[in-house]
Amino acid sequence: MTPEPSSPIILSVDRNETIPRKTAVTLKMRLTFLDGSVLHVTENHVRLTGKIDYAYQWQTAAHQLIHRWDNAEHHNHISTFPHHQHIGSEENVLPSEPITLEKVLAFIATRIAGAQPTSD
């Protein structure tokens, strides 16, 4: 399982739920950053294979998409299928290497450093 995230850019971590099932464990949480933006985390840890199905959605405080990374098995035209990212809108789908929560947090930290609040 993913450890509780820790970063100086995180204002709060709300663990929404951890759902243990026979074949997988699903982790859902919401992280609020110092600039007011929010990261919704969903990880489905498959017990038998060790595979992690993920969706990391970063959005403004006003719920506008900034960036989302996921490996849902759609967008099979993307060269890195099933891994892909949505930047700024659902329609803007681009390739993405497999990603982890730690890499997402590092990415967001570089964007928040010196940035304007993302609440509008």
Image (tube, helix red, strand yellow):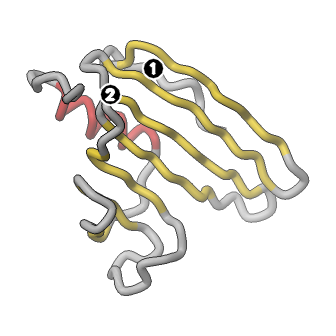
Disc 2 marks a residue whose amino acid type is Ala
Q: Position of residue 107 (x, y in %)?
A: 26, 40
Disc 1 marks a residue whose amino acid type is Ser
- Choose mark 1 or mark 2, whichever is in front: 2
> Residue 6: which disc?
1
Position of 93 with respect to 56 (left or right) is: left
Quick one: quadrant of the C terminus? Answer: top left
Q: Are marks 1 and 2 in contact (CB under 8 Å)?
A: no
Q: Position of residue 6 (x, y in %)?
A: 45, 20
Write down the quadrant of residue 27 in the picture. Answer: top right
Q: Position of residue 29 (x, y in %)?
A: 57, 32
Label 2 neighbour load within 10 Å: few <14, some 14-19, many 20+: some
Position of 102 with respect to 20 (left or right) is: left
Residue found at x 73% / y 57%:
46
Write down the quadrant of residue 60 in the picture. Answer: top left
State the SS at label 2: loop
Tell me: residue 29, above or below residue 65.
above
Q: Which residue is mark 2?
A: 61
**Along the line of sight, the residue nearer the viewer: 16 or 114:** 16
Tell me: residue 42, above or below residue 22.
above
Q: CA distance from mark 1 to mark 2?
A: 20 Å
